[in-house]
Image: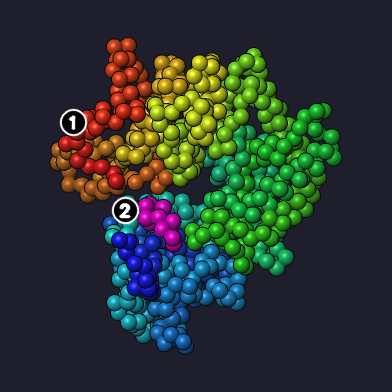
Amino acid sequence: MPKTYTGEDIDVLEGLDPVRKRPGMYIGGTGRPGLHHILWEVVDNAVDEATNGYASTIEVVLHEDGEHVTVSDNGRGIPVDEHPEKEIPTVQLILTTLHSGGKFDASNYITSGGLHGVGVSVVNALSEELVATVKRDGKEYEQRFRRGTPVTGLETTKESTRGTGTTISFRPDPDIFESVAFDPSWIREHLEVKTYLNRDLKIVFRDETSDERYELHHEGGIQEYLGHLVEDLQVSPIHEDVFMLADDDLDEEGRLEIALQWTDAPKEQLHTFVNGIPTQDGGTHAQGLKSGVRSVVRSFMDTHDLVPHRLEIKGDDTREGLVAIVNLFLVDPQFQGQTKDKLNNPSARSLVSGALRTDLEQYLNDHPSTGEAIASRVVQAAKARRARRSASSGSSGGSGSKSRLQLPGKLADCSSSSASECELFIVEGDSAGGSAKQARDRDTQAVLPLRGKVLNAEQATLDRVQSNTELSNIVQALGCGLGDELTLSDLRYHKVILLMDADSDGHHIATLLLTFFYRYMRPLIEGGHVYIAQPPLYRIDAGQETHWALDDPDKERILDDLRSDGRNLTVDIQRFKGLGEMMPATLNETTLSPEGRRLLEVDIPDTERMVTEQTITDLMGRDSSARFEFIMQHAAEADELDV
């Protein structure tokens, strides 16, 4: 009989309990990105003081154990007086209550990155311990917390002190996070971006794990940042001068900075920020940039008769090779979610587009040589796109699948048209797909995310296989046809790499895909085109050394080697739950880059063809008796499953 459902079954989470119960709702997850997100929340509060003119210096200290961080600023200091309604010190209210803070009223902060009143209270909730130190009114105060709960009252630690400011020192809770070890290089990079976006700001970062100290200050602002990005991309600008826009009075809604430069890169690179927060998924301000660039460039080319006869110019052509930074400050930004990855303000599109159109149009007219160089780059992009389309439609002589090739929408294609150097990574899920798209070499590596577990091709008819969305996307991306109509010479990528999580679900999906390739696209396997990626399951940090382990036996081998060296090293082990939680740089280093990755080529020796046929029939076919027998024979080996 079903259990009754009454009011007694309804839980009411008080205080910060919701944060500890569902941390992912507030910080996006409990992996490395989520761990660093709580640091960004504290840093953003300090940066808000600086952005609004109340602070000039911020210091961030990663302590010697790598798991304890202190952030200090010389701003006004969090108020310490008793809150008139709650009758507790205001600093305690802010640190222990969701949706409390001074940023709901624009008279306190004209613009801010922390808007929802949940930032520092979430940090407190997810910290094993947190200490808040405030200097105000000539005194110094301190209050200590443990997992969001005060363990002391607000105490006066110094009756007389100079200056003002806030210091937050915290240690993340290992009961919440998969690993509480911070990445110094990631912290430094994040802090440096803050100083590019706020040219008057100085941030000192002390990394006690390596005894390094960095003073970060960039008076050149986003123009200097754009030069840094172009240099890192290892591309060449097609015009020397950088377009800069600075509007400090954006229709009384905020202020805007834009830096643009076209390069010979095969793709556009857009970096967008709102109130100092990186909006990785773009949003309405990014849409405004694209709209403005398209409109101005097309207008300039039409006015100066720079469009060749019968050549169609599309929006993507006008932005190919563009490296752009949008640094927008709004009084009331509306983000999608607490992690603030996407801006939703409808007005931001017209604000950015309008400001850009006016200034960029005037700039190109005043710098005709720059405008002509950009126009030449756009024409080059449009001709290359037309050539790729013509080659795709005509390469098979009108009879093969490429003459009707339609690429799936989720495919992030590479720019190279040489199939021999191109690779397609088939990944499970949009999260892993997003990481892989950021980590890949855009010239030669394409990424196709799949949704969930694909159809078991061993138990399906050809009609079902062809009508299955995920398998159909693979066939469309590869471009060489299916079954008896497969034409290997039309294959668009000479390496087809299955990139799945290093767990049992990932192995299952890889097996389903291999079954599909074996039954319906076997020439790919026989031609040596199918590979299985070997992403690490563990990261092992031993002193200054980092090792990557494929699985548990590999982990034990590495640990044994470290022990046999006789060195007394502190070893930290991180287990990756999935590819989506890996930083793009880590995914590139361990799994995508040809220099560091490990690939297994799928090969069927002549002597094993009958065994392969029987194995696939037994394990993937309709008759379950063979599977049952296999499971019973190998049950003792399955002592640790990811379920």
* Residue at the image point whose x is 26% and y is 27% from the top: 626
* Residue at the image point whose x is 22% and y is 42% from the top: 640
Task: Give the x, y percent position of residue 528.
Answer: 41, 18
Residue 628 appears in the figure: yes
Q: Amino acid at mark 1?
A: Gln
- Check disc 2 and report its element: helix, strand or loop: loop
Residue named by callout 2:
178
Discs 2/1, front: 1
Residue 367 appears in the figure: no
Q: Which residues are magenta?
A: 24-35
- As drawn, is 538 to the left or to the right of 253? left
* Residue at the image point whose x is 43% and y is 33% from the top: 455
Q: Quadrant of residue 301?
A: top right
Please tell me whether residue 196 is drawn above or below residue 307 in the rendered image: below
Mark on residue 633?
Answer: 1
- As drawn, is 486 to the left or to the right of 187? right
Mark 1 is surrounded, within 10 Å at the Cα level, by few (under 14), some (14 to 19) or many (20 or more) other residues, namely few
Q: Nearer the viewer, residue 368 or 35?
A: 35
25 magenta-colored: yes
Task: Give the x, y percent position of residue 62.
Answer: 35, 58
* Residue at the image point whose x is 77% and y is 29% from the top: 311
Task: Give the x, y percent position of residue 41.
Answer: 45, 63
Please tell me whether residue 133 is drawn above or below residue 177 in the rendered image: below
- As drawn, is 591 to the left or to the right of 237? left
- Check disc 1 and report its element: helix, strand or loop: helix
